[in-house]
Amino acid sequence: MRRTLFEPEHEQFRDSFRRFLDKEVVPHHLDWERAGIVPRELFTAAGAHGFLGISLPEEFGGGGVDDFRFNYVMHEEVQAAGVNASGLGLHLHNDTTLAYLQQLATPEQARRWFPGLISGDIITAIAMTEPGTGSDLAAVRTAAVRDGDHYVVNGSKTFITNGINADLVIVVVSTAPAAGARGLSLLAVERDTPGFDRGRNLEKIGTHAQDTAELFFNDARVPVENLLGEEGKAFGYLARNLAQERLSIATIAVAAGRAALEQTLSYVRERTAFGKPIGSFQNTRFVLAQLASELHVAQTFVDAAVVAHLDGELTAEEAAMAKLWCTDLQVRVMDECLQLHGGYGYMTEYPIARAFVDARVQRIYGGTNEIMKEIIGRSLGL
C-alpha cells in the first residue's frame, strides 16, 4: 500500500537531511563509536542546517512548525544510513526534551535557552532514572529543598543519554517527599551549576557513540527561576510527554527493522552456498517474507499513530502499544537478519552486527516493555 503520511515538504526535508548525514555523520561515526562520544560541533552543524528545534518559534530561530513528521523523517534516514549509534541524539533533543521546554518554559526561560537549543550550542538531556528505581518514577529520591531563591538538590541519576555533552538537564526531583508522585517537580539544571557533577561515561553493549552518564547532585544550588512548570506537577507533565517519547521509539524501531531487512535482502542475493544464492532457499524466503509482512503491518500502525498524535488524539495506551510491539519486533528482526548473514553477521564490520546490539536497549528505555504491558493492561480495566 502506498504511504500517504508525508507531504512534498517532508520529502524535500528528507533529501536535505540525507545529504547532511552523508557528509557530516557517515564518514565519522565509527570513530565516534570508538571514542564513546561525538564532538559538540556535530550539534552545532545540525543546528546550522535547521535540524534542531523545528517546532520552536521562529522568533528564536526555530522552524515554527510543530509537525512530528519531520522528526519521523530524521529517524528513518538515520536508520537507513546505518548510523543509529552515531551519538547525534536528535530523537532525545527534538522529540523529548524540547517538548517539555516548549510546553513549560516561561517567556524568560525561552529567551534564555531557546536560541541555543536551536543552534546546537545548548545540548539537552533528561534525568529520570535513579540507581535502584528503574521505571518507577514514584520512587524518585533526588530531593530539592527550597532555600530562598534556590533549590538545594541532593541525589543521583544514571543511564542519562547525552549526560556528558549536555548543557541543560531536565531533572526529575522530589520537592515534597511525603507526597510521593504528587511531590515531583522538574528543574532545568545548567552545566556550571555548583554541586552538579558528572560521573562515568558508561560502557554499553551498543549505541557506543552515544554518551550515557551518571549524574550527581551534592548540595547543588539551582535557581528557583529554573523550575519548569509548577511544583508538584511533574508526574502529569511526564505522563503527557512520555507518549511522544514512546511514539518516537516506535518509529525508530520500525525504521531500523526496515533498514535491516533491506541490508539482508541485498546480502542473501549475493551470498552463495551450495552453488546458488542463499536467497533462493525456501527457509530464507519464508523468514524474510514473515519479517516483511510484520514490518509492513507495524509501519501502517505507527503511521496511523503519528496521524493521531498530530491531531492530539494519541492516548498513552496507544503509544505504549506502539512502543511495545515495534521494539519487540525490532529485536526479533535483527536476530533473524543476523542469522541469515551467518558468521559474517557476528562481525562488527557488518552493519547488521551493530544494529543487533543497538536494538536491545529499545525494549528498556522510555519505560521497559513490561511497564508498557502494565499501562495497556490497566486500560483494559484489569
Image: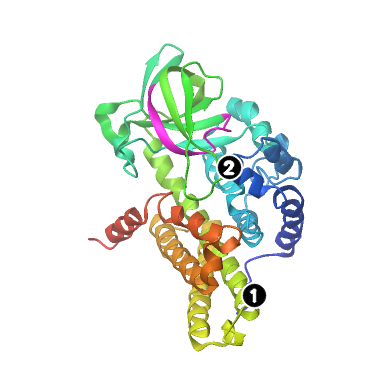
| Crowd class of label 2 (few under 14; some 14 to 19; many from 20; radius 10 Å) | many
In the rendered view, would you say 48 is above or below 21? above
Task: Say which residue label 2 marks.
Answer: 93
Mark 2 falls on what kind of element?
A: helix
- Separation of residues labelled 2 and 1 (CA atoms): 33 Å
In the rendered view, would you say 133 is above or below 311? above
Nearest the viewer among 305 and 219 is 219
User: For the C terminus, which image quadrant?
Assistant: bottom left
Magenta range is 154-167
Nearest the viewer among 7 and 130 is 130
Residue 80, horizontal then vertical, whole percent: 64, 62
Q: Is residue 294 magenta?
A: no
Residue 230, horizontal then vertical, whole percent: 43, 30
Task: Say which residue label 1 marks.
Answer: 266
**For the point 73% across and 37% down, which residue is it?**
61
Please indicate whether residue 50 sits to the left or right of residue 135 in the image.
right
